[in-house]
Amino acid sequence: MKAIQHITLAALATVFALGLSTDATAQCRSFTKKRCLPKLEEYVQNDNYNTAVLIPGDEAELSLTFFGGRAYRLLVCGHPVLGDLNFQVLDARGNGVYDSTDKDMSHFDFRVANTQQMTVRVQVPESSAALQHEGCVSIMVGSKS
Amino acid sequence: MHTPSTRRHSGAWSLGALTLFSLALLAGCSESAPPEDTSQEAPAQQVEEGAMPTTRTNALKKIFHAVPSPIETALLLEASGVNFSTGDLHDPAKASGYATTGSQAVNLGVYAGDLSYATIYNRNQEAIEYLNVARRLADELGVGDLIDSALIARAEDNRQVRDSLIHIVTSTFYALNARLKENGMEDVSGLIAAGGWIEGVYLGTRNLDGATQDLKVRIAEQKLTLDNLMSLLGSYPSTEDLAAMIASLEPVETAFAGVAIVDHAATTTTADDGMIVISGGPEITISDETLAAIATAISEVRNHYAN
């Protein structure tokens, strides 16, 4: 009887965890469409889907090539439950060229003079809340001439 | 201390409570209210679309790799003076001949490249035709509902408005990539990206005799995006199709090895219009021999898949 209870509880917990995980992933697409894509309205969006379900303390990185002569909007769009996300842009050598800390901006508009690879690094701030939440974080890039 | 009887009751209560809690939470998630600014709300009220309580405690680092979209590549080709040539596009009639998931995915990418090329050059009839071809292959991959009759009709209605068509194409392929990743088919998404990249470089290298210097540089720059693509393909759990694609691209990598890149640190300046400009970065040069080698290598891999 005890074994059956344990197995049942374990199975239910697994189903519960999988249900949350699948639901969170599915909800990210809808969240991104409603809350993030409109901020790239004036730009031709890159069609890569760089979205993940993250928790406080997590990091995300995106490596991408930016073309000389085009104007870009880099958008780091996270669910408000995660707090203010910080992000940095690093050149191919790992040198920082932009840091959003203290700027209160979720996007960075820029041009590159010469085509170059850069890395975007995003941090989800730590939280001391008793009940931790996970939320969607999307790194999006739009460009225009 | 619990007696066996109270333990049983306790276990039953826990089971029931967990079941009720699970059902309540899942129901709450699926019927989420319209998104509001929840940053000031109590944590218990923050279960809404895109966020929910987590049981995970170990922090992770998620790494993404991205390649330019076919639309972005087509815009670069147009700006570099490449002329549109229908004869360079993949034959739409061949779309029904791809039977495996791998060949369907790569060719969906190839056709997405052609769709983007036709869209940017205002070749509206071809664009609609390639959108229909994309629909057929997306259907084979189980995501055909994202290119439904309503979307095709919207594209038809906007066929004279390039910006609208661009938006339709990019948002459709964004949704398609999202759905594939959501369904655990990231490898398929990667193969589509590879097909799109291959077709973009293929179209850019078809008529090099009169190539502008700008076009030559744009082709050379694809060494960087090939690096992004190989990292993307290598980031997924290996499959037979992914391994085959990586192997197929090795001769292309060899050809691109002739492109010279001298790296410099990036610096930022502010332009007159207030836009931040990132200067520095690499100096990229390419010889005509390397350009010809790239054209040959990309043609071979493209025609291997789009046969």
Image (tube, coloured by chain):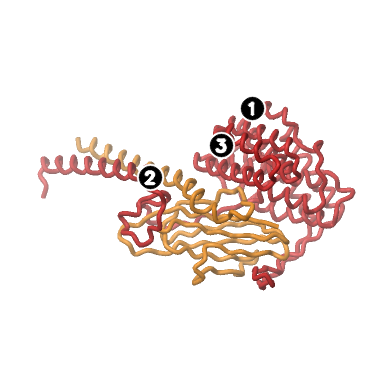
Chain colours: A orange, B red
Q: Quadrant of the N terminus of chain A?
A: top left
Residue under pointer 2 = A20
Q: Secondary structure beneath disc 3?
A: helix
Q: Disc 1 to disc 2, how far (Cα)?
A: 35 Å
Indicate the position of residue B291 as horizontal and vertical percent values: 83, 51
Q: Quadrant of residue A15?
A: top left
Are the residues under marks 1 and 2 on the same chain? no
Asked if A91 appears above or below B159 in the picture, the reply is below
Indicate the position of residue A125 as horizontal and vertical percent values: 43, 64
Residue under pointer 1 = B99
Residue under pointer 3 = B146
Q: Nearer the viewer, residue B69 or B12?
A: B69
Disc 2 vs disc 3: which is toward the camera? 3
The amino acid beneath tag 3 is Leu
Q: Disc 3 to disc 1, how far (Cα)?
A: 20 Å
- The crowd level at tag 2 (other Cα within 10 Å; few <14, some 14-19, many 20+) is many
Asked if B254 appears above or below B195 in the picture, the reply is below
Q: Secondary structure beneath disc 2?
A: helix
Q: Chain of mark 3?
A: B
Asked if B176 appears above or below A36 in the picture, the reply is above
Disc 3 vs disc 1: which is toward the camera? 3
Check whether the beta carbons of the residues at disc 3 and disc 1 lie within 8 A of each other.
no
